[in-house]
Amino acid sequence: MKSDSNNTLLLEVDDLRVSFPTRDGSLFEAVRGVSFTLGRERLGIVGESGSGKSQTGRAILGLTAPEALITAKRLAFKGQDLLGATPAQRRAMRGGSIAMVLQDPKYSLNPVMKIGEQIRESLQAHQGGLSSSEARRRVLQALADVAIDDPARVYKLYPHEVSGGMGQRAMIAMMLIAEPQLLIADEPTSALDVTVQLQVLGILDRLVKDRGMGLIFVSHDLRLVASFCDRVLVMYAGKVVEEVRATELQAAKHPYTQGLLNCLPRLGASRHPLPTLNRQEEWKL
């Protein structure tokens, strides 16, 4: 299933493979033949830990470990070949055209820099030549855009002085301040409570609509992805086993997707014995 025809095509991924060397000299394929396209829409990627979701996002952004082997028939952003780009071209694109929000702000924000200065550094790396006052104004506006009530106060705080939800909002502000056209969000709400999750999702939804961005939303939570995204890729053992529209996820055909859906808790329904996933070797082939 391709992105809607009325969408501007942003990303093309055809037969993406990511392999890592092992101690015995062989290669372990973490991503095996992933293909999809993305327009100005919200694409969800779901699956268990180790299914290759995050490695797919990192390969697109060029953040894979240097020892990894990355191949693809085509990996392109707005027609530009990403695998053939020079390191300088990838650095210029990273953050400026494609950005990635990682899972936990505690491990992504610099603990010895104030939040405002970190966001300002990201802005100036991609849009140099701004005056000090203009850069500060842009940072304060970015914090306000992610629903932080007192941007001037948060600007001066260190990461350990804010809550997890506010830290995640600051990370989103940092990734979006250079106005990228594609955002990869890797489990952006997994460390947050339900109320803050909804707030962060609302922020992402509004920003995607207002700015006309493309969004790749990586998550374990099928129910969350079904309610938030337009399309869903289901990954297992490094492969895409099914692609469906989010509204049709409950009617998915693949046994693995059905197994994931069956493991979701249901109020008022008996769950004894607890359902388990029936993994089959042929799904890996």
Image (tube, rainbow, N blue to C red):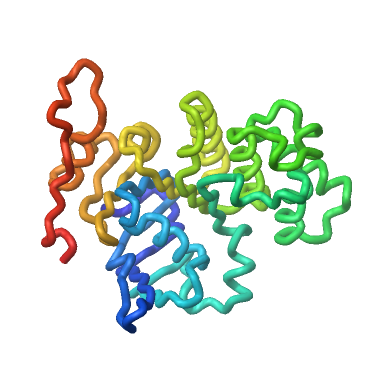
Residue extending farthest to the front is 23
* Left or right relative to 166: residue 135: right
Residue extending farthest to the bottom is 25
Image: 40 above or below 248: below
* Left or right relative to 162: residue 47: left
Question: Can you give x and y, in whole percent of width and height, for residue 115 in the image?
Answer: 74, 44
At horizontal 53% and vertical 50% (from top left) the residue drawn is: 102
Task: Name the residue nearer the viewer: 101 or 110.
Answer: 110
* Left or right relative to 40: residue 158: right
Q: Quadrant of residue 126?
A: bottom right
Quadrant placement of the C terminus: bottom left
* Left or right relative to 277: residue 96: right
Q: How many numbered tags mark residues here?
A: 0
At horizontal 55% and vertical 33% (from top left) the residue drawn is: 203
Question: Can you give x and y, in whole percent of width and height, for residue 282 in the image?
Answer: 11, 61
Image: 147 above or below 213: above
Q: Quadrant of residue 250?
A: top left
Question: Can you give x and y, in whole percent of width and height, for residue 135 in the image?
Answer: 81, 48
At horizontal 78% and vertical 61% (from top left) the residue drawn is: 128
